[in-house]
Structures are given as C-alpha cells and as structure tokens.
Amino acid sequence: MIEASAILKGPEPTIEPEFQLQLEELLELCRTNLRSVDEELVKRAFYLSYWAHRNDRRISGERYIVHPLAVAKIFVEQIGFDDIGVVAALLHDVVEDTEVSLEFIEETFGPVLATIIDGLTKISGAFESRDIGQAENVRKLLLSMASDIRVIFVKFADRLHNMRTLESLPKKKRFKIAAETLELFAPLAHRFGFYALKSEFEDLSLKILNPTEYAEISKGLREGKKVRDEYVNRFIEPIRNRLKEDLFEFEIYGRSKNTYSIYRKMQRQNKPLNEIYDIFAIRIVLKGSGQKGKEDCWRVYSIITDLYNPIPERFRDFLSVPKSNGYQSLHTTVLGPEGNPVEVQIRTEEMHGIAEQGVAAHWKYKENVESSDAEMDRFLDWVRELLDNPDPEHAAEFVQDFRLNLYDEEIYVFTPKGDLFTLPKKATPVDFAFLVHTEVGYHCIGAKVNTKMVPLSYQLRSGDQIEIITSKKQVPNPDWVKFVVTQKARTRIRHAIKEKRRETTNLGRQIWEKKAKRLGLKIDEQMLTQIASTLRFPGSEAMFFEIGSGFFDVGDLASAAKSYADGTSTDEKPPEREALIFDKFLDTAQSAGGSALLIDGKHQANILTHYAPCCNPIPGDDVFGYVSRAGGIKIHRVNCLNAPDLILNHADRVINVDWSRQKNLQFVAALRIMGEDRVGLVSDVTSVISKSLKTNIRSLRVDTEDGIFTATIVLYVSDVKHLKRLMQRIKRIQGIHGVYRYEDSTGTDGSN
Ligand code: MN
C-alpha cells in the first residue's frame, strides 16, 4: 500500500489527458450541483481509484476507470447529495475488485467512507450470488441502506451505468439484471422521489425484457410526435398568453410519459398506442418558492380552469399534503381541444427540483434543511420497521409488502386533535392504531371514523378523522391479519399470537404437572416426547398447547403416560385424537366419514375426513383436502390462513374435494358481531337467530365495554347460504355495525 499512500499524500500523479479532462468535468459538475465540495478530496479519491483499477478492464474491453467516473457523474447530476457520496462513487468497486483494503480506506478517508464502501461491497456480493432468494437480497440492500443512506444512492448510480452498458453481457445475465432493476431499483427510486432515475430504470429494463414492444412504442411515439407537438402548442398558447399578462415568470412545456408507463397503460387498458390519450402531460414550473410560490400555483390553477373545463375526479392536491417522498404539485386534468383529456401539473421551481431529484434535492435549498432531515428520518424509520422483524417464513410476503409500501398510493387521516398520519391505501383502523402506538394496536376494540362507529376492518379514506377506542381486556385477534395492510400491524399481531400460544402451552404444561403430581407419575421430558408421538402430536409442545386450550383432555395424557410407564403402550392403537377434538370442539364428527363430501368426484365412505379447526369449513365454502400425516383427509377452506403454505409447500398432499348434495347435516359455524350497546340488543340478536331463522345456538359470549358490544356466537347451520342469510338478518338489527364469520383463533393445525 506504499504506492497508494504516495498517491494520496505526494504530488499529483500524471494521468492520461482523456481522464484528466473527465476529472475536470466531474469537478465542474460538483461545483454547480452540490452545495459545497472539497475538491482536493474528490481529486485524491479519483487518483486512488485510477491507480487501483489501473490493470482492470470492463467486459466491453474499455478501461475500468470509465465506470467509477461515470457512476460519480451520474451521482452528482441525478442525485447530487454531497461530496462524500461522490468520493464513495469513485471508490465503490476498489475494495471488492482491487488490492485496496477497507482498513486502508478507513485510515485515509475516515470511518464514514469506510462504512459506505463496506456497505457497497456487501450489497454487491448479495446481488452477485445466485442462490440467495430475492427477499434476502432486499433485506441486505435495506440493511446497508439503514447504515448510511449514501450506500443506496451510490448503488442507484452504479446500477444505472451498468444498465446503460449492458450490451456486452450474455443474454441470461442481462435478463436477470433487468428484471431486478424493474422489480427492485425502480420502486425504490420512486420511493425516494428520484423520478428521472426511476423512469430510466424502467425504460432500460423494458428495452431488455421486451425489446419488440419497446421498439414498437418508441417508433410509434416518434411517428406521432409532430401531431402531438402541434396539439400541445395549440393547448399551451392561450395559457402562455394569460400567464404573461398576469406577469408570472414560468416555463411551460409538454412532457411525454416514459415508455414503460405507456407500455403499462396499453396493457392495463388493452389498447394500441394510438388509442392511449394521456401519453403526455403539460407542466408549468413557476419561479419562486415558499408560501408565495404555493399561492401562485393556486392562481395558475384557476386561470387554467377558466380556459379549459376540468374533470373534477382527476384533481390531486399534493401542495397542501405532499406525498411522503416529498413530492409537491397540483395535478388537474382538463378537456383540451377536440375534447381530449390533458393532464396539467403546476409547481414551483423548488418543488420541481424535489420532484426530479427526490429527497436529495432538499440539500440544495438551504431553508429546507430541517424539514428534509425530518423527511429522511421518517423514511429510515419505515425501513427499520421492516428490518426490525426479520421473518424468513414470510420472506415472499416481505417483498410483496415492500413493493406495496413503495408504490401504493397513500391516504391521509387525522386524529381528533388534528394530527396528520400517512397510511397506505386500504389501511384500516387497526393499521392506524399500530401506527400510533403498539399498545394502542394491541388493545384496540373499536373505532370511530368521523364520529361514527365503524368495524375494525373498515377501509380508511383520505381526510377521515379517526379515533381508536381501546380496552385493557382486548388482545389482538388473528382475524386482523387478514385485513391489515401495513407490515408493522401484521408483524405485531403475529407476534402477539405467538406470545399467546406460548402462554397457552405453559398453562397446558402446568395442568399436566399438577395431574402427574396427584397421580404420582414420574415422567421425564424424553418420555413425554415419546408419549406425544404415540398420541400423534408433532411434539410435546403441541400436546401441551392443546391441553392448555382445552382441545385435548389431560386425563387422556395421564392414561397414555400410565400405560407407557407400565410398558404396555407399544402394541396399543393410539386413540383417535383428532376425532376426539372434533367431538369436543366442533361437534361435526357426525358428518365425518365422507357423506357430505366428494373426494376426487366420488363418495368415499371408507376414507376418514376431518374438518380443519383453523378455518371450520361448512358446505358451500370453497375447500380442498389435505392428506394428513396421521392418515385421513383434512378439509380446509381455500381462504384459510394455512392454505397458501399447504398448497405451495405440500402440493403433493393436496387433493380435490367437493361438497355432495347431502341434506340435513348440521355444521358448526361461529359469528362475531360488533356494535353499539343498548338495552335489549342481546335478545334482539338471539331472537333473530332462533325465532326468525329457526337456527340453534350452541354458545353465546357477550362483552360490553365503553358502550361497545361484541359477541361471539357458535351456531348450527346447514351450509354457507344459511349462514349468509343469518349474517344479513343480524346486520339489519339496529346498532349492529359488523358481522363476521369467526374462525378459531389459535392458528394451530397447519400442516400435521
Ligand atoms: Mn460498479
């Protein structure tokens, strides 16, 4: 490293004129795009990179230094964050590809740069290795990002340059990189508000993944350009005149959407290019900033709607409530000449900078430093939230959520005090409750939206004022997982369910220990495991859980333990545990044996069937059969929580099952009812059920607290139709806000 040290401390080395010139260009870009720049630092980083890569070539054959230089330029032009980022861009490949070590970087450039370079080296490894699943890649990327935001910014620039120069790679590799760019980098760039980057990522990916469509759309756009330009000019002309009269300083122009978004529109609307109207938008960028600038935007808006008729549903006000990536603009769609809808975007120069360069643009406008820091903090909080709960079982879901959180439109809701919260579209009161505080989420029992009671699964809308009602007695309900949309709510609910499961298991163990003591049985852990296995439990934990939740009688365990201790267990047939459970819990054993079911289209009287307690199917539900390890077939609803896992991971055990037309069988189903409490409500509910619809109630549990009424009713029904009729009738009772089909909450009985 003596040579390298000399480069950093000694006189400036001689570089070929071509690269010396490029260095000058880079420095010039830094001066115009960054708030401040340590030119000496940037130069030294370039010299080190130049020296370290002196023997390297790119696959295309050109000198390797071309790449870090290009990455640094992209970084300055498109992201423009700070000079540390530029240095990191110049050095991003040296630790991975050359003899320069991380220690050396740390000694000469300090710990901050070492952290960034280390992060970049690690992600690069994550993306190279083939067998790491995509979710894991995302995690690594985010982890490195959470350590220093510049890691991801440099990675964006690196990826963009690689995408621009992909031709020299083999086809398969090109595809992989393009797909990854589209799936991961484009949405991430969007989340940061780097629109120019995002558009180029998308277009370059499309060009590789779908070259024919790409070429056709580009050709179509070129051919239609003249007509389009004329139209845009006709549209703009009167606006330009009015704005000039009113002494605005502004720019106005038509802007084509990127190829990829036009491609998506054609796919969604299933239309050829010449039938897609909104392939361009008119943009008006006003000089000025701050409050005055905002007011100007509104004035321009009213001028435009004087000239052209607006389509009210397409109006979007991102001025008063910016998007969470900082985007601010007024969008309106008006009817232009010949009645074509034309989108108009109105914003100030300052907002425009943010729209194009995302959060990083804040660094250019000094007065915004504080708000941009808050912005960044909020974003990093979100990232950490995702990372806090690593959950390999749900890796695919993680990627899904990640994308959802990146792309989905957001809604804005208010607390009664007027505090504003941002949530993804389709968020529910439960999502909101967990966003406010985990404890609020755990104990939420009801919600009022705009002062009216709503069910917890209610989908919030922008502008809603929401108040959460909590109760200490309330615990998270597994059903909530089905309707919440935020990662935070989902992981917290799952965590609570696991916790509850552990408590129940401990309770079961205590019950057993008491019993064993009373009977004087001395059974150790190993013996328990064996007994559990003869009783066809996957392990002793599962057995204790069922004892704790009352599905399995501790007496049965005691007798099994006794026979085991007497050494008589070996030849004995194990008791039909599952049948026992059903007798006790569901009482549907009468229909087991196949009479209500067709397996592969036939009645199969000799095959033992069980109804899975996790989803409690009744005739009319979409169901499938799962061949259980204990033998027999377990019937699950298609929308059971366990279904995706069973179908995806154990497809060979899944079989086709239908309901036969057997009549007069009774099935157990449970309903959960919520509403505002009042005198006589319970008797109204029970009389609708038992008198009007002649349905037998098996059990009824009612809770009221703070004027909120909740009830769980278990009843006998013949099929889904019957159950639906009941639900509709109950819904009509005054004060009832929600009626849901209730499934067993233990989440057990998945795959065994
Ligand atoms: Mn690189």
Image: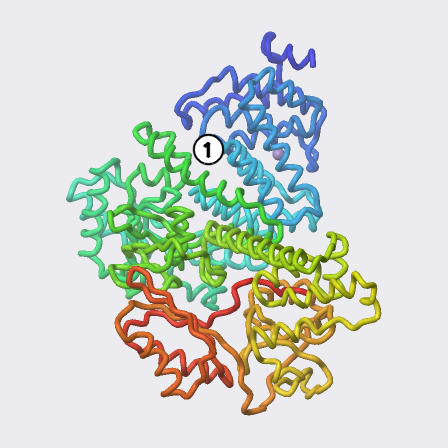
Q: Quadrant of residue 379?
A: top left
Residue sitting farthest toward the left? 246
Q: Quadrant of residue 310?
A: bottom left
Residue 38: x and y in percent read 47, 17
Residue 486: x and y in percent read 45, 53
Residue 198: x and y in percent read 48, 46
- Quadrant the N terminus occupies: top right
Residue sitting farthest toward the top? 10
Nearest to the observer: residue 464 or residue 338: 464
Nearest to the observer: residue 505 or residue 652: 505
Query: Is 425 placed above or below 687 here?
Result: above
Query: Is 603 placed above or below 11 here?
Result: below
Nearest to the observer: residue 690 or residue 216: 690
- Quadrant the C terminus occupies: bottom right
Q: Residue at x 45, y 67 (%)?
A: 269
Q: Residue at x 53, y 67 (%)?
A: 744
Query: Is 738 placed above or below 188 here?
Result: below
Nearest to the observer: residue 106 or residue 73: 106
Q: Amino acid at mark 1?
A: Glu
Determine whether the residue tagged by mark 1 lies in a helix, strand or loop. Answer: helix
Q: Residue at x 62, y 53 (%)?
A: 393
- What residue is shown with label 1? 77
Query: Is 416 placed above or below 639 here?
Result: above
Residue 253 appears in the figure: yes
Residue 75: x and y in percent read 50, 32
Residue 337 appears in the figure: no
Q: Quadrant of residue 68?
A: top right
Task: Report the side of 707 relative to 663 (left or right).
Answer: left
Q: Residue at x 59, y 84 (%)?
A: 659
